[in-house]
Image (tube, grey):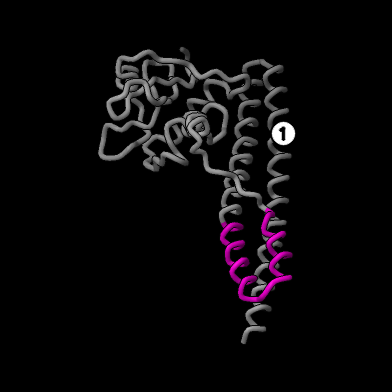
Amino acid sequence: MVRGDQIYVMRPLMGMDGVYEHHGIDCGDGTVIHYSKRGDEPTIARTSHEVFSWNRPVFVKQYTTAYMPDVVVERAESRLGERRYDLMNNNCEHFATWCKVGRNESKQLTEYGLDVRRLDPFASRQWIREAEEGDPMKAIALYNQAMGNLTVTQNQLQAQYNQAQDQVLTWHRTADLALKQGREDLARAALERKVKFKREAEKIQNQLAQLIETQETLKRNTTSLRQKLV
């Protein structure tokens, strides 16, 4: 284990040993930054290895591509004191994976079948076409359902866009550090990643624009239908 590693230990749950993974970031100085549950509520804190591990074996999460160690620790330090723990959206693995590779993901939730399903951003367009061929009351009900769906999807897309933008900035920072260390190969690879995420951000931005257009269409159609019922 070295500075910047994403590490984890197997923790017990409800009396059963080794049920789930508890993740953190190794700072390389005998401390780990992780979501600690020692206080009144879970808080991102820097603790000793002993406090993190509970004297259990510590494992390293392996990635083919990840941020440079200094960047990983810098990202972890930027969230010290945070108290926004959420099992489904912001648990210890979400945090550590975000620090290491910039993705707010929890593989455990996916494996347990608990990952939040990604909705089809534009499924509501089909609902619009189907509703327009039916009776107004049913159409309004479908429109309301579609608006709820689109709101959830918009929030998801916005989170993905913010994450892609964060990746752009972090890979730019990684390239700068690599150049200062004379590692042109790492700098080149980092800039390639930056370009990749910049394109991804632009793609998501276009999806958001289409989604907003769909929302406006829904609003216009709903207003028109309500007027017919008056």
Residue 74 among those drawn in magenta: no
- Magenta segment's dominant SS is helix
Residue 137 among those drawn in magenta: yes
Q: In this view, does 98 lie above or below 126?
A: above
Q: Residue 227: image x %, image y %?
A: 65, 83
- What's the residue at 61%, 75% (across, down)? 137
- Near-viewer residue (39 or 141): 141
Q: Residue 133: image x %, image y %?
A: 73, 70
Q: Residue 181: image x %, image y %?
A: 62, 17
Local secondary structure at mark 1: helix
Which segment did they paint magenta? 122-151
Q: In this view, does 18 lie above or below 220?
A: above
- What's the residue at 43%, 36% (across, down)? 91
- Near-viewer residue (104 or 33): 104
Is residue 27 rendered to the left or right of residue 152?
A: left
The image quadrant of residue 141 is bottom right
Q: In this view, does 136 lie above or below 111?
A: below
Q: Give the farthest residue toward the bottom.
A: 230
Is residue 69 rendered to the left or right of residue 171?
A: left
Task: State which quarter of the image contains the C terminus.
Answer: bottom right
Q: Residue 208: image x %, image y %?
A: 67, 53
